[in-house]
Image (cartoon, rainbow, N blue to C red):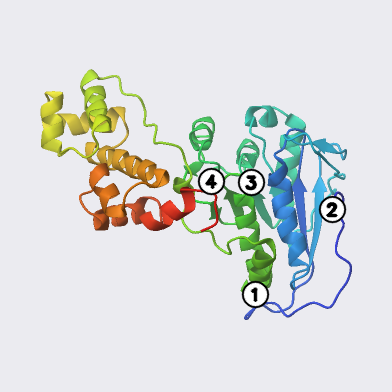
Amino acid sequence: MEGVAPDTPRARRTPGAGHAPRARRTVVVVAFDGVQLLDVTGPVEVFTTANRHGGDYDVRVVSPTGESVTTSSGLVIGAGEPPLRLPRRRSTLLVAGRQDWRTAVADTGLVSLVARMAGQAERVASVCAGAFLLAEAGVLDGRRAATHWELATQLATAYPRVRVEDNPVFARDGHVLTSAGVTAGIDLSLALVEEDWGAETARGVARQLVVFMARPGGQAQFSARLAPRQPQHPAVRRVMDHVTEDPAATHTLTALASAAGLSGRHLERLFRTEVGTTPGRYVESVRVEAARTLLEAGGGTVEEVAQQAGFGSSESLRRVFQRVLGIAPTQYRARFHSTAAP
């Protein structure tokens, strides 16, 4: 590949069960000035490592001009000219992203290149903010898509024809795949390796790179504190402040309506209109964030955390964490309390 040397010919292992030997697959990664380094190198490392575990990829890093690109971290990546035409079968176009996505989508030459190559490739994928380039090129119209949780609202606002999902590590809609932030490009690439060459090859790559074969949970585990739409109605603001000040207090609809000086039905209608959720869901979200803060601080037992956050019992806390975050409270604490090895 241009920018990354291809593996030399070697004896290949048999693909996973149910996967007959297949011809070499082409992966073209689109890079450009300001691109996030790991958006490019993460997937490239997965696909080239797969070549040592039974896969057979021709991996190329290309730029719109065919010249090297300077990444967001200041490192330079060697890149080549985009191929005039991708093979329709056994080809994957992967579009990296840049945090300043507006600059990327304003580059008409880059967008045209993405649109042209996306129309040729068998599969199309993006990493992180690369979803904005796919959206600008019209590839995501009417499709489900993921991006970094911080950018999900911006993607949905800028491209209303895209069905944006803010929690998946990666999403697939037909032949188009989009991943969440940065390292999620590794998860997406591993899934493609498994699809192409079987689970055994993908497991070999995951072990080699010391990453999850399938990451547990979604982006909600990593996102910042919930920031709902700011309401205009003073009664709704008063209720939200009341809940945030003491998540463990009794916050039934009746109690909240009394605090707001409204009927329960009127309060629910105002919440849906101004906050985009129900009072009950808002209370739950505040309690989840309170529990996360307590677990990350490391103080107290899970039962004590549940009481302090307003869940009443560790079992209630566990059920909500599994539903909202896809992880148990004990696992959350182990993962986010410290970077020290257990």
Residue 144 vs residue 238, the one in the foreground: 238
Residue 87 vs residue 319, the one in the foreground: 319
User: Cα distance, mark 1 to mark 3?
Assistant: 24 Å
The mark nearer the N terminus, 2 or 4, is 2
The mark nearer the N terminus, 2 or 3, is 2
Within 10 Å of disc 2 (Cα), the crowding (few <14, some 14-19, many 20+) is some
Q: Residue 151 location, x and y as percent?
A: 53, 35
Q: Residue 288 location, x and y as percent?
A: 33, 44
User: Cα distance, mark 3 to mark 4?
Assistant: 9 Å
Q: Label 1 amino acid?
A: Glu
Do the residues bearing badges 1 and 3 touch, measured as CB atoms within 8 Å?
no
Identify the residue position indicated by label 4 in the image. 146
Within 10 Å of disc 1 (Cα), the crowding (few <14, some 14-19, many 20+) is some
Check residue 127 in the rendering and tell me which mark sits there, or answer none: 3
Q: Label 3 amino acid?
A: Val
The mark nearer the N terminus, 3 or 4, is 3
Which tag is nearer the camera, tag 1 or tag 3? Answer: 1
The mark nearer the N terminus, 1 or 3, is 3
Identify the residue position indicated by label 1 in the image. 200
In the displayed structure image, the side of residue 61 where residue 121 appears, left or right: left
User: Cα distance, mark 2 to mark 4?
Assistant: 27 Å
Q: Residue 199 location, x and y as percent?
A: 62, 72
Identify the residue position indicated by label 2 in the image. 4
